[in-house]
Amino acid sequence: MSLPDFEQNCAFLIHDTARLIRRRFGLSIRDLQLTQAKWRVLTALMERPGISQSELAERLDIEKAPLGLALDWLEQAGWIERKADPADRRVRRAALLPRAEPALARMSERFRAIEANYLRGFDAEEVAQMLESLQVIRDTLRAAAPTPASTARTATVATPGTTTDTTNANARTETYVSVLFECARLLTRRFDARLAEMGFTRNQWLVMNTVYRNEGMRQTAIADATEIGAAPLGKVIDALQADGWLERRADPRDRRAKRLFLTRRAHHLLSGKRQRFEQLHAALLQPLGPRRTQLLVNSLGWIRQRLLEESPQATESRLAGAH
C-alpha cells in the first residue's frame, strides 16, 4: 500500500490510528449506551480497580467534569461503586460491580471482531514487532516527560477485553493497542505543551491542520474529521477567523454554504512549525532506526486505512472535503 507523504509521519499515524480504533469500537457498542468516556472508564477499572477519580482523569486524559458524568451514570446503572478512601476521605475510589460483567463480555467480543478485521493478513510475528516498536517509542516519551508520582502507578492504558492484576502482570500482558493508546496520550501531552508556548489550543491547531491538508472543507466535514462538537467547533473557527488564521468563503455551487481556507499568514506559520514538530518527532524514533520505523509506519498505515474504509463517517468527510 502506498501512503500519502503526510500519512508516512509516524507520530500522526500513532495518534490517528488510536483515534480511529476508539471511534470504531465506540460505534460498535452504541446499543450498550456507552459513550467513549464510559467504556474507557470501564476498561480502566478492569485493569486498576480502586483507582481514584483524579487518577482516572490523568490516565485517560478526560476532563474531570465529563468524567464525573460518566462515573455518575455507571454508578446509577449499578456497574461501579465509589467509596471514600480510608486514608483520605476527600478521595473517592471506583471499582467494578458484578452487574457490569455482561456488558464487559460483549465489549470484549466486539473489540475482537473489529481487531480481526483490521489485522487481517498480519501474522503473530508482525503484531509482536509492532508491540515492541511501540514500547520503544512509549519508553522514550516517558523518559522525555516523566509522569507525576500520582500517575506513575497507573501508566498502562486498559484495552477492551484485557485485564491485569499487578504491575508485573501489566508488563507481561501489554498489547499493541494498550501501548498505542498510551503513546498517543503521551504524544498529545508533549504536543499540547508546545502549542501552549505558541498560544494555540489543541483544537485550534487540529482545525488548522485539517484545513491545511484539504482546503475548502465545509464545517460539517471538519467536525467529522476532528470529532469536535458542532458548537465548540464553531467557536474555534470564529476565533481563528478573528485572529486572521482562517477565512470563510461562499461555496460557488451553494451560496448558503461556507468553505474554509487558510490565510497566507497561516500557511507561513504551519509550513515552518510543522517542520519543527517533525524534527521533534524524528528524535523520538531514533532508538528504532530507519528500518523498524518504516515497518511500524507500514503496519499502522494498513490498520488506519482499513479503519477508514469501514467508517461511513470518515468516507463522507473525505468526499465532502473533496468537492
Image: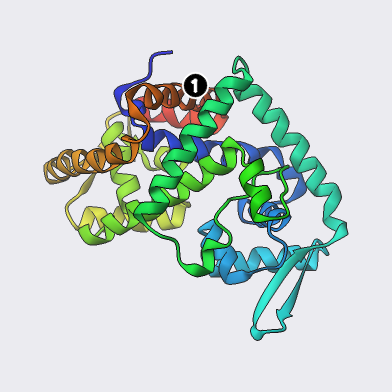
Residue that mark 1 sits on:
302
Q: Quadrant of the N terminus?
A: top left
Whether 204 is drawn above or below 281: the answer is below
| Residue at far front of view | 168
Residue under the point 41% across and 29% down: 320
Where residue 197 sits in the image (x, y, percent)?
22, 61
Identity of the residue drawn at 70% across and 58% down: 45
Callout 1 environment at 10 Å: few (<14), some (14 to 19), or many (20+)?
A: many
Q: Quadrant of residue 12?
A: top left
Q: Residue at x 38, y 19 (%)?
A: 3
Q: Which of 197 and 232 lies nearest the eye of the viewer?
A: 197
How many tags in the picture? 1
From the top left corner, tell me how far across and down residue 152 is, in percent: 52, 62
Describe residue 188's horizontal placement relative to residue 79 as left or right: left
Residue 227 seen: no
Q: Tag 1's secondary structure?
A: helix
Amino acid, disc 1: Trp
The residue under the point 56% across, 71% down is 54
